[in-house]
Amino acid sequence: MSTVTSAATDRRRRLRELRRAAPFVLPFLALFAVIYLIPTGYALEQSLFTEKRSGLGLTGARTVFAGADNYTRVLHDTDFLHSLARVAFIGVIQVPAMLALALVLALLLDSAVVRTGRLFRVAYFVPYGLPGVIAGLVWSFLYAPSLSPVVRLLDSAGIHVGFVTDTALPFAIANILTWAWTGYNTILIYAALQAIPPETMEAAAVDGCTGWKAALLIKVPQIRPALLMTLVFSIIGTFQLYNEPATMKSVAPNLSSTYTPIMATLRSVSSNNFTYAATQSVVLGALICVLSVAVFRASARRTDS
């Protein structure tokens, strides 16, 4: 009897807590549904339809149910698949280098060696404050064969470099991303370093663990959640790449209109093929979710081991 009474009491207590929390949670849930769930559901619905024209195509298009036909088409769309491969390659060469650089800069900011930490924090963060289009324009000027002072300087030294060739384009774009986002990730990692209790570092110093040894053995393991967050954010941002390559088309005519998945999707939109664009968006979103979950699970397994 006492067990039943205790369960009923716990149930009433949880209901009271939910009622108290509801005014704070419901606005977020409503905004989340309007901004995320409803558009996602609409894209999923549209991806199951296609537009067909009868006769000679002189009549209006009819929207008909297509089932998984659009998804089958995506899997055989070489332009879209190549765009995924390009951003994956850019991510593989850029994300590790950027996060490693951001970690080193954050550790330097957190060290006692840096006396003007606030100045450096502002300096690191300035590139992130510039819109991606502006960053793309600035670097396009430095990459353009006919305009770049860097190219002219190298040519005068007998070194002929093409920054916008097919082979160099992924590295040129990766360089822009690294320049723009290293400071942002540095500040995130630095904030996590600031949360490490001073007692931890004092105990390490007593044991003779100081300098870079303390940074690598004590500080870095303590900020694993922040490093994981920056990694996931960087993966998501890489697959959503658009501004930089779209801006570079003015100096790189060889850069295709489907260079990235977002560019490929926008080409479908400009062709009024909205249902196929919705399918491409769903596939891209699903791929990003799978990669993010895989990173989280891999990190959890490593932590457990």
Image: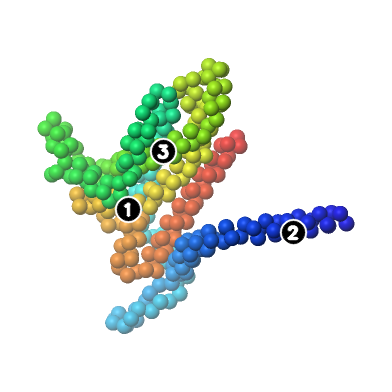
Residue type of the residue flagged with mark 1: Tyr
Q: Nearer the viewer, mark 3 or mark 2?
A: 2
The answer to whether residue 266 is left or right of residue 10 is: left
Report the residue marked by disc 3: 187
Residue contact at pointers 3 and 1, CB within 8 angstroms: no
Q: Earlier in the sequence, mark 1 or mark 2?
A: 2
Amino acid type indicated by mark 2:
Arg
Q: Nearer the viewer, mark 3 or mark 1?
A: 3
The mark closer to the camera, 1 or 2, is: 2
Q: Which mark is residue 131?
A: none
Residue 295 image offset from top left, x and y in percent: 50, 44
Check the image and report above or below for 108 versus 230. above
Left or right: residue 33 versus residue 178 is right
Secondary structure beneath dot 1 equals: loop
Residue 103 visible, this orientation = yes
On residue 12, which mark appears? 2
- Between 74 and 248, the one lying in front of the other is 248
> Cα distance, mark 3 to mark 2?
44 Å
Res. 242 mark: 1
Q: Position of residue 73 (x, y in %)?
A: 40, 64
Q: What secondary structure is found at the residue carrying circle 2?
A: helix
The quadrant of the rendering that contains the N terminus is bottom right
**What kind of residue is marked 3?**
Ile
Percent position of residue 163, x then y: 22, 42
Compare residues 275 and 23 and report the one nearer the observer: 23
